[in-house]
Image (spheres, grey):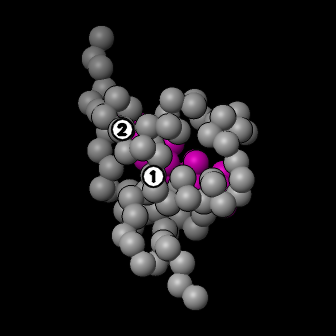
Amino acid sequence: MTSQKELIPMRPGDILRYEREQKGLTLETASTQSRIRLSVLDAIESGETAQIPAVYLKGYIRNYARYLNIDPSEIEERIDEIEGGEPEVR
């Protein structure tokens, strides 16, 4: 039987959320255990990543995928679809 991930093209945040939910983890638990801020995980899963500097975004996504034991190739194919914000210059 084919899985939902194979039938519908999913954004990286959708894949990550799906895998987290399949493992029975709350976003809060994932944040605590992965040591990635809750607001960052929420933004990644919802696709609202404009506030996260682009230079950090891909690293957050890769680390979150590793935490969820997702094959990096599943995420790498789609990671360029995500856009982060421009870093603030001070």
- Residue 38: quarter of image: top right
Instruction: Classify mark 1: residues with Cα within 10 Å, few (<14), some (14-19) or many (20+).
Output: many
Label 1 is placed on what type of residue?
Gly
Q: Pointer 1 and pointer 2: residues touching (CB < 8 Å)? A: yes
- Residue 68: quarter of image: bottom right
Q: Which mark is residue 21?
A: none
Q: Is residue 41 magenta?
A: no
- Residue at figure coordinates x 57%, y 30% from the top left: 37
Numbered disc 1: secondary structure: helix
According to the picture, the residue beneath numbered tag 2 turns out to be 49
Q: Is residue 57 magenta?
A: yes
Numbered disc 2: secondary structure: loop
Label 2 is placed on what type of residue?
Thr
Q: Identify the magenta region.
A: 53-69
Residue situated in front as seen by the camera: 78 or 17: 17
- Residue at figure coordinates x 53%, y 39% from the top left: 41
Residue 71 image offset from top left, x and y in percent: 58, 67
Residue 45 image offset from top left, x and y in percent: 47, 46
Residue positioned most to the bottom: 1
- Residue at figure coordinates x 37%, y 45% from the top left: 47
Location of residue 53 with respect to 76 vertically, above or below: above
Q: CA distance from mark 1 to mark 2?
A: 10 Å
According to the picture, the residue beneath numbered tag 1 turns out to be 13
